[in-house]
Image: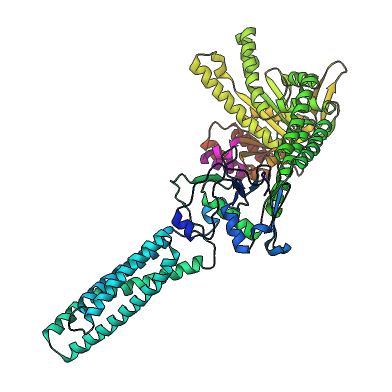
Amino acid sequence: PPEWAAPAIDAITPVYFLHARAAARCGFVTFDADADGVIRRMRLFQRRGDDVLSQLALALAADEIGARADDFAFSKGRVRMTPHGDARAARTFQLDRDGYTLAPWVAGDDWRRQFRHIPAGLIWSVYHRRLLIQQNRQAIRAGLAEILSDPFFPEHERHAADVRDLQNVRSQLRLAEYAGDRSLAEALRPMVEQLESMIAERERKGVERLRGAAESSHDAHVQELVRRLSMLDPYYESNAEIQRSLDDLTERLRDAVGGRICLIGYTATSLADMKPIPTHPGAPGVMAHANLLNGILTNRLMRWTTTPVNLLLAAVCGLWAVWLTVFHAPREAAAGVTVSILAVLAAAWAAFRWWNLWVTVTPAIGAMLLAFVTITVFVYIFVDRERRQLSTALEQYTSREIARQISENPELCRRAEVREVTAMFTDLKGFTTISERIGAERTQAVLNKCLGLFTDVMLRHEALVSKFMGDGVFAFWNPVIYPQPDHARRACETAVDLSRALDEFKSRQRQEGGDEVFQELVLRIGVATGSAVVGPCGSEQKYDYTCIGDSVNLASRLESANKAFGTLRLVGGVARDQAGDGFAFRPLGALRVKGKAEAAPVYELLGRREEVDAGSLEYAERFGTAVALFARREFAAALEEFEACAAQHPDDSAAELYIRATRQLLASPPGDDWSGAIELTEK
């Protein structure tokens, strides 16, 4: 191989010589980590002097598929292995300029499941059992040698001599094997086998002669020999039991490793051989060789994109990001760039998964991010300054999100349309009388704090605060400039939070010794949903972005109707239906306000359902039953229910209102055109 494919090394660490002598060939097992410490690449060849060493997995695979040294062909960035010239069995490795190839790692985040693992203890158990059997046999042979050396046996002297000869020849054979003298070892092995066969045959015949004599003779000497022979039975039994377990273990191992390539290596996590790999933060080094070997045998070899291809991909992606950023809004451009990056990653994953192609995505992603960030920063600093100034000014009147929408789409502010909105009116109960009593400065301070508190809550729920009306606030949801499909829910959430915010504020003022006037403040709220004209209204010199319509008027009337019902939060029927199941309401029947011919269903907003106690829910249901009886003209039954409600809650003004109305209707029944509504004569 050329020098770039087989870099030179200064020295090698030799293999344990007994292993090397038994091995078919040797391969190097070292590998280097990338800059981040992860093992991804491995060299296939190294050179020391004039000798070329192959990587262990490559050497194993070459032997397995029958490839020889002259079956390797090198070209620029490639090495092709063609066993026996068979192109169908060829393997092509891509190499970088340092001679590395990417290891084809098996998918999975657990290296223990990549390949089958057999504990080394099982192999040792086979050796250990064989050793025990051998030791038992030696004990048996020693015992038999002692027995057969008795003059009772005709060949006792010959047997003792053969046993000594066998021990001597075995010792010579071991020395020859250690010395690497193969010719002497080959000459001694037949002698060992012959002596073992002769001794085994003589032992068999001797045991048979002894057992036969014991059956026909009661000679004390013979019986002693038989007794000594019986002392060897535990060894025979032990060997039989060990042999059975050895056969079972051998069969299990044969099923596991028979006909397979086995790699032996450390897998204990406490050892220093654990290395980070792409699929796991720490795996045994032997797994690197196993993955490379598996890739070569299955011809699943990794390729990667070259530098020219990476540059071309970066240029295309960068131009695409430039087009997205220049011709689209920042948010759309960011989404487009994000989707593009995800698409590049998905394509790279697909190429890696199905075509074993490693695509270097960093240049392409970096080009897209650089183009997007550079252009966006330039536009932000030099182009969007006026737009930001407008947004900052608008944030004083509405939420930051709505202000941003307006600044990015100023044309929306000039367009009016009829659309469904949810309007809210708030009012501080009796504040006019309070302001006359406390003077201008205290009025201003109290009002500013309260209106600031209410505005913060409304903006948190993304309301458009249209105007301040004395001590009240008019706000609405779902303007043209910022559509809100859940506008009714937002308004109900805001109403609940406004009441809670005022209670918490009053509590803080009481604890901190604030103005005592705050403890007198009570907030009343009206909420209604319906169609309205939404857009800018006013003169050319000055206009408000507001909404006008029956639903707005109804919200204002509901805020005032709190006085008659003794409630704090009234909600129209449409708003109640669209708010969802997250709130608890008390039905208050139909209401016809001054100036309106049609009655509108009205509900008291009790709060979020999970925050309302069971007693209040039960009372609301009972009150609703009474209202239903009232609407069906069952005035006597309705009066009974309303009086029961008043007895349960004497301070419930709504119950008192219905009691008066019911008694009046009992005294003077209504006509057929009666709508079943409560009529209020005040706005």
Q: Between residues 430 and 333, which one lies in front from this camera angle?
A: 333
Give the image location of residue 412, x and y in percent: 83, 28
Report the quarter where the C terminus lies.
top right
Q: Between residues 677 and 328, which one lies in front from this camera angle?
A: 328
Which quarter of the picture shows residue 210? Answer: bottom left
Horizontally, residue 145 falls left or right of residue 18, namely: left
Q: Farthest residue in the bottom direction?
A: 216
Which quarter of the picture shows residue 148? Answer: bottom left
What is the magenta segment's predominant secondary structure? helix
Q: Farthest residue in the right direction?
A: 540
Query: Could one spot residue 556 in this view of the protein?
Result: no
Give the image location of residue 251, x and y in percent: 45, 71
For image coordinates 74% across by 31% down, the residue present is 370
Q: In this figure, which colouring scheme has been used for the structure?
A: rainbow
Q: Which residues are magenta?
A: 606-625
Give the image location of residue 258, x and y in percent: 51, 68
Give the image location of residue 459, x and y in percent: 68, 26
Which quarter of the picture shows residue 252? Answer: bottom left
Q: Is residue 530 above or below residue 273?
A: above
For image coordinates 76% across by 44% down, the residue present is 672
Is 411 included in the stretch rendered in magenta? no
